Image: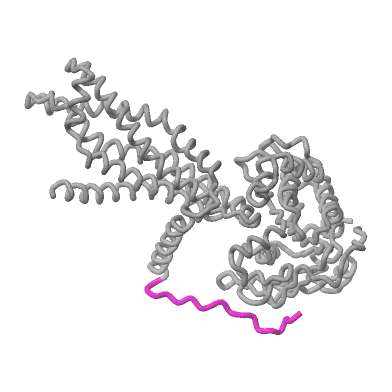
Amino acid sequence: MKKTNPNINKENKVISIRGLKKAFEDYKVLRGVDLDLYQGENLVVLGRSGTGKSVLIKIIAGLLKLDKGHVNVLGQEVNKLKPKELDELRLKIGFSFQNSALYDSMTVRENLEFPLLRHSRDLSQQEIDNLIETVLDAVGLAQTINQMPSELSGGQRKRIGIARTLILRPEIMLYDEPTAGLDPITSIEINNLINEVQKRFNTSSIIITHDLTCARDTGDRIVMLLDGQFQRQGTFEEVFNTNDERVKAFYDYNFIE
Amino acid sequence: MDTDEPVIKPPKRRYLISRKVDRVFLNLYDVYTFVLRFFKEVFFPPYEFKEIIKQFYEVGLRSLPLISLTGFIIGIVFTNQSRPSLTEFGATSWLPALISIAIVRALGPLVTAIIAAGRVGSSIGAEIGSMKVTEQIDAMEVSATNPYKFLVVSRVLATTLMIPILMMYTVFVALMGAYVNVHQHEQTSFATFMVDVFDAITFLDIFASVFKSFLFGFTIGMVGCYKGYNSSKGTEGVGKAANSSVVTAMVLIFIEELLTMQIINAIRSM
């Protein structure tokens, strides 16, 4: 069980979502979502597959447009930003994709250099090398620097994906199913890495998952997405200490203590 | 949590003509905006020079072996197949002129474009399609990099600029193949062959071929990128994008060939 991070600043909301609605054709995915993420907090969004968890963080990152509601990230309304302003905001958001989304025609080094070469043009090659070394050390994969993504294991790919987002020093991290498809040991390593990133880089994170071990080990607070809305929120015990059959079923079927 | 609040209803779908016809027009609009975006982005920095040079290499240098072989064989075969008809009229001395006109005006640009559509178009469609389904394009977007500029502009520029160069190379290699055949049968010297070749063609022929090749190159790059960029989820979508890139590009190339031929003939007869 994770100890709640003492550095959470409840006075400072880095993400604030009100009345968020999103539908695809006739399928209403998000039906009025309200959510706050505080500075320094790891917030886990739990829910079954297809309940709109990934849609939620894609809207936060501006990859999908919302139908209705307000999404405020670091004081800016995401849906009202011009492309250039959105790009500037995105530099403060790290997005770790479910399948890592490493550029498979590039080596690990080139993957990590990719955002730097475009957004930190004043850096010397030595400074770039130092940054790459720092983030690779942070994810414990310094030896993979010249490897291609196809040569890495699933867990290593996840780690490099996280390293690539960390290289621009984001204030917010969005993790989409960070432990999906990984064995239990690697999953625990990824959970530890998420907590390490929170401490070392002082990030605020939203972790999308249906893995209860991941939720328990990484979340300072957990919210549960059911029927397009957040139905329960609190610590791990608070969320699952309920008679709501839908929540109990989720716990019973997915969690082995 | 406002569970009782009425949920917004997505707008009711109304079709102007029918679902299918509307979709055709919507797709056409999509293509229009996709192509228009190229012209909006190509003239403004930042430029992805490294990626552009990489694509020049992929499109140009890596096509050379296939182009060389195909061009040379086409030169030999076309010359060989044309000889009997000319022999009937005792006009084999016209072979270099006939070959030169056919290769410079039509075969060179068309063969280069078809080979490029098959080799380059399909690879662009598959590569971008696979990047789309594995969320690599989304990853670029969230790292505040313009994926259109990095992927589409660089590839379309490479095909547009490299296909004319490849076309000139194909024409040269095909003429060499033709020369080998002519020399073998008619013992024509290289100098005589080349004089006959250049006597038969005009500046308009060369200009038209280069212009067509720019058009074909733009088409191949744009179709490959569009199909890849709009591929549906899953590996099946990637396969379809690659296949559809080749088929669509070829159909468009033949239509463009037909149209440019009519226009050039009209100019020639003025």
Region in magenta: B1-18
- Is residue B6 part of the magenta span, yes or no? yes
Query: Quarter of the image containing the C terminus of chain A?
Result: bottom right
- Is residue B221 part of the magenta span, yes or no? no
| B120 relative to A254, above or below | above
Counting from the top left corner in percent of width and height, residue A24 is at: 58, 69
Along the line of sight, the residue nearer the viewer: B250 or B153:
B153
Query: Quarter of the image containing the N terminus of chain A?
Result: bottom right
Q: Main secondary structure of the magenta part?
A: loop
**Position of residue B142 in the picture relative to residue A177 (left or right):** left
State the image quarter where residue A222 is shown: bottom right
Identify the residue at horizontal 22%, vertical 26% (top origin): B79
User: Is residue A209 shown to the viewer in this render?
Assistant: no
Counting from the top left corner in percent of width and height, residue A227 is at: 71, 72
User: Is residue A146 shown to the viewer in this render?
Assistant: yes
Identify the residue at horizontal 72%, vertical 44% (top origin): A157
Counting from the top left corner in percent of width and height, residue B237 is at: 52, 51
Counting from the top left corner in percent of width and height, residue A5 is at: 90, 61
Along the line of sight, the residue nearer the viewer: B26 or A129:
A129
